[in-house]
Image: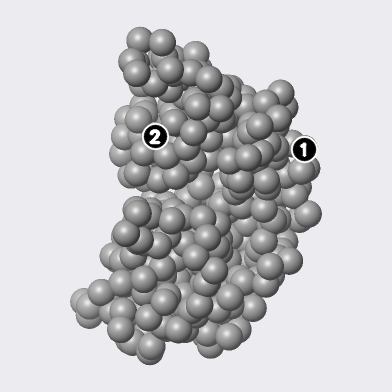
Amino acid sequence: MNQGTVNCGEAESYIVSCLRELGKTKEEIDSRVKEVRRDIAATGTYMHTYEELVHGARMAWRNSGRCIGRLFWKTLEVFDCRHIFKEDDIFAALQRHIDYATNGGRVRPAISIFRQSSPDGEPEVRIWNHQLIRYAGYETEHGVTGDPASVPLTRICTKLGWRSDGTDFDILPVVLQTGTREPHIYNLPRQLVKEVPIRHPHMESFHSLGLRWYGVPFISDMALEIGGIRYTAAPFNGWYMGTEIGARNLADPFRYNKLPEVAKLMGLSMDSNINLWKDRALVELNTAVLYSFKLEGVSIVDHHTAADQFVRFEEQEAALGREVSGNWSWLIPPMSPAATPIFHRHYENKIVNPNYHYQRCPFHQAP
């Protein structure tokens, strides 16, 4: 086999399971399997039909062991972008995806899938950003301004010519690369990015913190693998679970670390852990996030509802004879996990394809 040649067994296994789920006849399945075998023998790879691509992307969501929101896997909208190669056209497609998914705040799950990896060396498409929309992070003599998780990419964007305001909530440009070409940076139009100012329903002073967050998480640095074929650029989105923002992004000490400021607003002593100041501040910060998103009309789900939805997903899969795998440490929410049904369940943590996979960070190619 040539380097990068698709494994015929993986391809056949996917085609059979996919087409069976889609209700195809045995004759149709056998014919398609023979066609895939011929293509792999001749070229080292094969192309998914649009139907196979769509169902594969949805199956990948269904198989994502770290995702609590899998109940809605069938609703994923799939944009076939395999014919798009130029950076400007890729960015235009990403803007269409963001606009469709944001939907004025009524978030719609979607994925844009660009060209597949190929054994003949065709240039891969890579998106350097972890998320299409994320805030920059700047190292200063007083610590980090903005998001500490974004410091490496912010530094690279600056070297590539990006100029920013240096605030806590500057939206990073999108960095695109095809093959070994120099990366290109693109600024997202402000009107395309839905942001939510974070306020509290009862604490009027909360607004003084100046917190905000973007409305939709677009994961953009993972690879989608379907039937032995790897798509290195396949950005996807769902909607936020409140704790992702309120208990992680804004609360983690290695991110925005806002719990001490919230506690101070609440008049809580931080001299000892025994009064549970962190817990009390965490609840109010998460209350503010959920309240603010609802106030702005942006889709979000609380962690208790999300856990109940995951149980429904498990029940649906069991009725179809499919086992649900999962990473328990990711499935339990980062706030009050013992108050959700997931906490008391066990899952086999195994990777089932199709799936979304982490891939090597391209930053080593940075100028």
Where residue 53 appears, as percent x and y from the top left, is 55, 63
The colour scheme used here is: one colour
- Tell me which amino acid carries mark 2: Trp
Q: Quadrant of the C terminus?
A: bottom left
Q: Quadrant of residue 99?
A: bottom right
Q: Which mark is residue 330?
A: 2
State left or right for residue 128 relative to residue 263. left
Of residues 306 and 157, the one nearer the viewer is 157
Q: Which mark is residue 23?
A: none
Question: Quick one: label 1, few (<14), some, or many (20+) residues within 10 Å?
Answer: some
Mark 1 or mark 2: which is in front? 1
Residue at 43% of width from left, 56% of height from top? 145
Instruction: Determine which residue is flagged by label 1.
Output: 295
- What residue occupies the far top of the structure in this picture? 274
Report if the CB atoms under discs 1 and 2 are less than 8 Å apart.
Answer: no
Marked residue nearer the N-terminal end (1 or 2): 1
Residue at 76% of width from left, 55% of height from top? 103
Question: Quick one: label 2, few (<14), some, or many (20+) residues within 10 Å?
Answer: few
Where residue 215 appears, as percent x and y from the top left, is 64, 50
- Element at badge 1? helix
Residue 192 appears in the picture as rendered: yes
Where residue 205 appears, as percent x and y from the top left, is 66, 32
Where residue 35 appears, as percent x and y from the top left, is 46, 73
Q: Quadrant of residue 39?
A: bottom left
Residue 357 appears in the picture as rendered: no
Of residues 98 and 356, the one nearer the viewer is 98
- Element at badge 2? helix
